[in-house]
Image (spheres, helix red, strand yellow):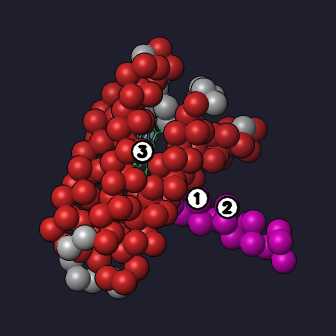
Amino acid sequence: MKSKTLSLLVATSVLAGISTASIAQEKKDPTLAYRHHAMELIKDAAGSLVAIMKGEGNAADFEVHAKVLAASAHGSKWAFEQKVAGGETKDAAWKNWDDFSSKLDEFVVSADALHAASDGDMAAKAAAFKSTMSTCKACHDDYREEH
Ligand code: HEC
């Protein structure tokens, strides 16, 4: 049963377009896998929040998705601090660690603020969401290898 679940997971990852080379690399280094999954969770939580803001999701779950995003932001910060080269991270991240690390800090702070805005009205939620999403691009432009 366990191995069936695992092969299903691997199959899903392949379907999601993750190259077999990056899977092989992640098998060797669990921190790379953790980093990757934290980012994927962030993307999926953001997708769920967009659906809710468009009125296509369950508004009552906003807080849960925001919490997943914030927890994964903290997780990604920890994972990057292990400074494992590879994956889809450009070497520039390690070379310009101070800049990369301050972008990570801004991201974590804004993700926490997004989670805190769960109690607010839709305008406050949308503003907090927009500010969190601007931190993604600010970092990806310089430090993420697009495949
Ligand atoms: C401080 C930098 C930084 C911030 C902020 C950031 N990312 Fe990333 N992201 C990266 C890096 C670097 C990678 C490549 C990770 C790796 O080595 O696999 C990445 C990878 C990803 C991936 C692909 C999965 C992977 O690991 O290859 C997704 C999806 C993603 N990020 C979504 C987001 C979203 C959505 C946000 C904002 C809500 C965000 N990221 C914020 C740096 C960042």
Residue type at the position of mark 2: Val
Q: Which residue is mark 2?
A: 10
Of tags 3 and 2, the one toward the viewer is 3
Secondary structure at badge 1 equals: helix
**Residue 127: x and y, percent?**
18, 58
Residue type at the position of mark 3: Val
Is-magenta flag for residue 13? yes
The verdict on label 1 being within 8 Å of ligand 1 is no
Asked if the residue under mark 1 is in contact with the one under mark 2, i.e. CB atoms within 8 Å, the reply is yes
**Residue 98: x and y, percent?**
43, 19
The verdict on label 3 being within 8 Å of ligand 1 is no
Q: CA distance from mark 3 to mark 1?
A: 29 Å
Magenta segment: 1-18
**Residue 27: x and y, percent?**
73, 44
Q: CA distance from mark 3 to mark 2?
A: 29 Å
Q: Which residue is mark 1?
A: 14
Side (left or right) of 144 relative to 117 = right
Q: CA distance from mark 2 to mark 1?
A: 6 Å
Is-magenta flag for residue 16? yes
Secondary structure at badge 3 equals: helix
Residue 86 to residue 113: above or below: above
Which numbered disc covers residue 108? Answer: 3
**Quarter location, residue 50:** bottom left
Residue type at the position of mark 1: Val
Tell me the residue at 49%/63% (across/down). 68
Of tags 3 and 1, the one toward the viewer is 3
Q: Split into 4 quadrants, where in the image is the N terminus?
A: bottom right
- For marks 3 and 2, the one nearer the N-term is 2
**Quarter location, residue 70:** bottom left
